[in-house]
Each structure stands twice: as structure tokens, then as C-alpha cells.
Image (cartoon, rainbow, N blue to C red):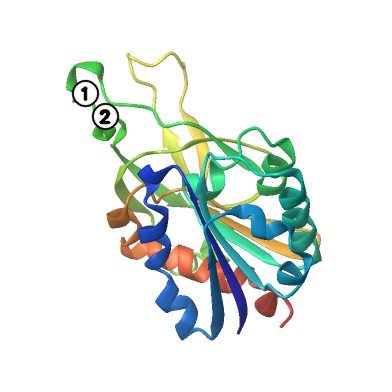
Amino acid sequence: MGNALVVRGGWEGHRPVEATDLFLPFLAANGFDVSVHDSPDVYADPAVMSATDLIVQCVTMSSIEREALAGLRAAVAAGTGFTGWHGGIADSFRASSDYLQLVGGQFATHPGKEPSCRAGDETDNFLTHTVEITELGRDHPITTGLTDFTLTTEQYWVLHDDLVDVLATTTHPVQPWHPWHRPITSPAIWTRRWGAGRIVVTTPGHSLDVLQNDSVRTVIERGMLWASRTASAS
């Protein structure tokens, strides 16, 4: 199938090692030779990047050097697939505007529970919400056959542009303790064409149990295959 580069690191709260380890057997079973790196610095190596068909990134927040970011952008434009989930792709390298443009969407917040119900831990932001497949998503190879599904976890509010092709959305309702005045719909799963490359972003994935949800895992795994240069060339 080709060469896959797994890049992981950043904020440890998203369990980058354990999360990416969940998908290494899938990549191997689908014929990828997998190389794992604990820093985005590998993106600055043109020989590695030109031989890479798929990048799976799980790096929340953190920072990226200019040469590495330029290498990532050039590789994707040349046909390398780029995918990931949750903060590992949609909340990476906040200070790098060229990265945000590449991905097309950026985590803004995850609204919380009613204040009196908060315990002072991460569950304060665990809301039951629905991921709704769009009309485009119903026919797309990544999401075809899936129905709307419900999760109780962080619900990402995403700032995005209209170059993304949205396969699924989630809607943040109006609540008395929040300052917005009408429901806000955010993309939950999207693809993006960038030069010859394909990008797939799946916003659910805060914890290992969410990544093992049947629908979430299906989207991530199909997204890897769809994004890969080997698939886009076929």
C-alpha cells in the first residue's frame, strides 16, 4: 500500500502514544510500512517526505519549526495524504498560520456542562451530542453506510473555511449559561484537497474509548486509506 509516517507528541492528555498505537495494526494489515516519530522535525527531511504516502499526526498544541512546516506543506501539495483526529490535527501548532491554512479548521473550544454540575476535571466538558452525517457524507467513501451517532465526550467547536468538504457536523445548542444566542454547527469530519494531496480531519477522539467507538474508528481508518497517495493515484 505504501509508506506511512506516524508523528505523535505534544500534550500528553490526549495519550498520543497509546492513541496512535491503536491504529498501527490496521496500517500494517493494509500493507503500509510504518515509521513512527516523536517530533514533527521529520517533516523537514525531503527524502523521507517524498517517500511518504500517508502521514498520521497526533500532536496536540506544541510548536513546529519553519523548515518542518514548509516540508509538510510541500509534501501534501505533492500528494502525501495527511490525517488525524481531535486535537492531534485540529489543535496542533496554534501559532503557525500556515499550518491552520493547510488543515482548514482549528479547535476554538469545547463547551462545558451547566456550572453546578461540574466536578473540576475533564468530564466538565463531556457532553452528550450527535454527529450528523451530511448529504455529501452519505455518498463519500469515508462515511458511506454510516448513520448519525451519539457520543458523550468533548464536542469540538471549530473555526473553519469553505474549502473543506464536510462529511459530518455537530451542533452546539443554546444554553442559559453560555453567551451565544443561536445554535452553532461545526464540522465534525471533513476532507480537504490541497494540491495533489488529500487531508482528512476527524474531531472526535479525546480519549481511547472514543477512538474505539465503532463509528469513530471506522471513519479514521477509512480516512487513512482514502487520504493515502496510493489511493488517490488509483
- Disc 1 packing (10 Å; few <14; some 14–19; many ≥20): some
Between 136 and 25, the residue placed more toward the observer is 25
- Residue 71 image-quadrant placement: bottom right
Residue 107 is situated, as x and y percent measured from the top left of the image, at 53, 36
Above or below for 161 versus 226:
above
Between 7 and 140, the residue placed more toward the observer is 7
Mark 1 is on which residue type? Arg
What is the distance, in whole Å, between disc 1 and disc 2 at their CAs?
A: 5 Å
What residue would you read off at disc 2? 124
Dot 1 or dot 2: first in sequence order is 1
Residue 224 is situated, as x and y percent measured from the top left of the image, at 55, 69
Q: Is residue 205 left or right of residue 63?
A: left
Between 88 and 201, the residue placed more toward the observer is 88
Q: Secondary structure at mark 2?
A: helix
Residue 167 is situated, as x and y percent measured from the top left of the image, at 55, 55
- Disc 2 packing (10 Å; few <14; some 14–19; many ≥20): some
- Please name the residue shown 56% across and 74% down the image: 225
Q: Is residue 104 left or right of residue 219?
A: right
